[in-house]
């Protein structure tokens, strides 16, 4: 009853998602994945926490969402990062001219 929205943002960061019609309900989704050699990543652990605030912005509930209670849809897309997609030609010619004699 004393933790505010500001405190939650400071401790956990921005929420992964908020409820569609209720900005006083926040969801934090954490996934732990594992990748072995060239196989696709697989999810080892998935945790979803739901935080609800009252009108004053104070936490009233903090619960872990289980698979049985609600299904939070996850996007299948991957956040792109720069510098990871290099063509074979860029790899071969990338260091040409970078070294002194």
Image: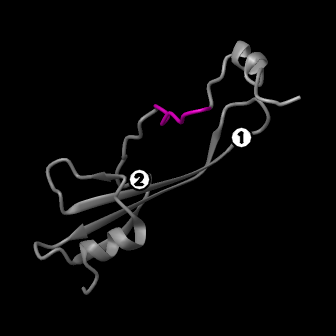
Left or right of residue 22, residue 42 in this image = right
Q: Identify the image quadrant of residue 54.
A: bottom left
Say which residue appears at 14% left-offset and 50% top-offset: 21
Q: Where does residue 53 sit, x and y in percent of width and height? A: 21, 71
Q: Point out the residue furthest to the top here.
A: 89
Q: Where does residue 48 sit, x and y in percent of width and height? A: 43, 57
Residue 68 is labelled as 2
Quarter the N terminus occupies: bottom left
Look at the image and say whether residue 79 sits in the magenta stretch.
yes
Give the main secondary structure, helix, strand or loop, of the magenta stretch.
Answer: loop
Image: 26 above or below 7: above
Residue placed most toward the observer, 48 or 5: 5
Say which residue appears at 23% left-offset and 52% top-offset: 19
Image: 16 above or below 62: above
Part of the protein shown in magenta: 77-83
Residue 75 is labelled as none
Q: Which residue is mark 1?
A: 35
Residue placed most toward the observer, 85 or 90: 90
Quarter the C terminus occupies: top right
Say which residue appears at 33% left-offset and 68% top-offset: 9
Look at the image and say whether residue 74 sits in the magenta stretch.
no
- Dot 1 falls on a residue whose secondary structure is loop
Say which residue appears at 67% left-offset and 31% top-offset: 40
Left or right of residue 94, residue 17 in this image = left
Residue placed most toward the observer, 2 or 70: 2
Q: Where does residue 96 sit, x and y in percent of width and height? A: 77, 20
Q: Point out the residue furthest to the bottom here.
A: 2
Q: Where does residue 42 sit, x and y in percent of width and height? A: 64, 40
- Dot 2 falls on a residue whose secondary structure is loop
Label 1, label 2: how many angstroms apart (C-alpha)?
27 Å
């Amino acid at each position: 009853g004393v933790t505010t929205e500001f405190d939650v943002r400071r401790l956990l960061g921005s929420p992964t998602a908020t409820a569609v019609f209720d900005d006083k309900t926040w969801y934090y989704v954490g996934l732990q994945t594992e990748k072995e050699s060239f196989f696709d990543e697989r999810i080892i652990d998935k945790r979803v926490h739901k935080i609800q605030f009252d009108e004053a912005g104070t936490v009233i509930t903090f619960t872990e969402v289980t698979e049985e209670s609600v299904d939070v849809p996850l996007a299948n897309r991957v956040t792109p990062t720069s510098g990871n997609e290099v063509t074979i030609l860029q790899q071969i010619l990338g260091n040409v001219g970078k070294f002194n004699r």
